[in-house]
Image (cartoon, helix red, strand yellow):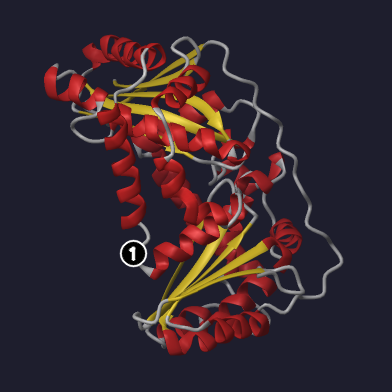
Amino acid sequence: MRLENGLTVIHQYIPATPVVVADVWIKAGAISEPREWNGIAHFLEHMVFKGTKNLPPGAFDRAIESKGGVTNAATSHDYTHYFITTAAPYLEDTLPVLAELLLNAEIPEDEFERERDVVLEEIRSCQDNPDFLGFQALTESVYQYHPYGRSILGTEADLMQRSPEQIRSFHRSHYRPENMTVAIVGGVKAEEAVEVVKRSFQSPTRNSKCAQIVAEAEPPIAEIRRQQISLPRIEQARLLMAWMGPGVERLRDAYGLDLLSVLLAEGRSSRLVRSLREEDKLVHSIGSSFSLQRDSSLFTVSAILEPENLEPVEALIIDRIAQLQEKPISDAELNRCKRVLCNDYAFSTEAPNQLAGLYGYYNTIANIEVAVTYPDRIASFQAAELQRLAQQYLSPNYYAVTVLKPC
């Protein structure tokens, strides 16, 4: 339901559980940043916990922990979200404290300097992670115009240019009830949950409206974009390959690419795992994934292997993708992929925190109905449609590839 102040509330009562999860999703991820403010959405996620005029630093954590609850937050390109898990009777004590932080974050000057050092250390630690470096280089190769190619963390240089007032400005523009979804799942009935949300998220008085950043559309990849990075901290090579997929405006196509990802490299009987790892022993591991994003999604294949196998493995991956375009997959393979995804969905919707995250995520980037219709949509695919999607999105001639090699 949508409240008068524009905030969306999603609720599911689970009488058998003694806990409740409150997950607040905000349309204020990295793609909402002006280009020159890269990293500010993630920095704000840190600064939100530094208190308000009515809530000194540390008071929020004490309020949650005193009720036996836990809390955390995360920033992505498309969203930022904050959640609390607590015993059901304590929702009315804990949610107002989270709402106070989100709506009225103070961004104190002294805490700003200290927390910037924390974020800078987070950036430095990522620079020591080969998998982070490889994936970031890959996404920058794919998204050369769209902000999906920029790191969510920003860079050290970016953060050194930020000021408390810039973060306050971003907060005022985006952390507004009309820009939020609150998902409440667990042992609290609807009437009580909605009443707590209404009391907690009373809209602050603000003159500024939510500034909408229109991201520049990313042109299709029309070549093989190849790059190689030499690193001293790895023993095996990494091969990362990527194709651009549809955003949420073409969800049917996105679901089909989910199936193709499972077909290629999820499970020992998938085509790439069976061929390249189990039979030919050319890779230590290989996987594929489809990452749904609001504007443009990412289909990836990645492998860990010996450097001398890089060229033959890339060629074999392209050959298997070409086979998808030339011949419909068998009923047995299609049914296996459907079972895998439907089982994954079932396993990911067992607990209140999983359900609250699912509802908030889909309502933020698309709409809530998508969250509950996924298994039926997956089950409806036929082989010919998947063949068409492979032809449309997984070109053997147009893709990005990043190679990490030991020095």
Residue 200 drawn at (x, y percent): 64, 82
Circle 1 packing at 10 Å, graded few (<14), some (14-19), many (20+), is few
Residue 373 in the image: above or below residue 273: below
What's under tag 1, amino acid-wise? Glu
Image quadrant where one finds the N terminus: bottom right
Relative horizontal placement of residue 333, taking residue 4 as reference (left or right): left
Give the residue at mark 1: 350
The reply, left or right, for residue 44 in relation to residue 177 is left
Place residue 406 in its image quadrant: top left
Q: Is residue 45 above or below residue 235?
A: below
x and y percentages locating residue 26 in the rendered image? 62, 60
Dividing the picture into quarters, in which one does residue 331 lie?
top left
Q: Eyeballing the image, is 185 above or below 68? A: above
* Snapshot quadrant of residue 17: bottom left
- Residue, x 56% and y 87% (percent of image)? 192
Instruction: Give residue 113's position: percent from left, percent from top.
Output: 59, 61
Q: Residue at x 43, y 26 (%)?
A: 386
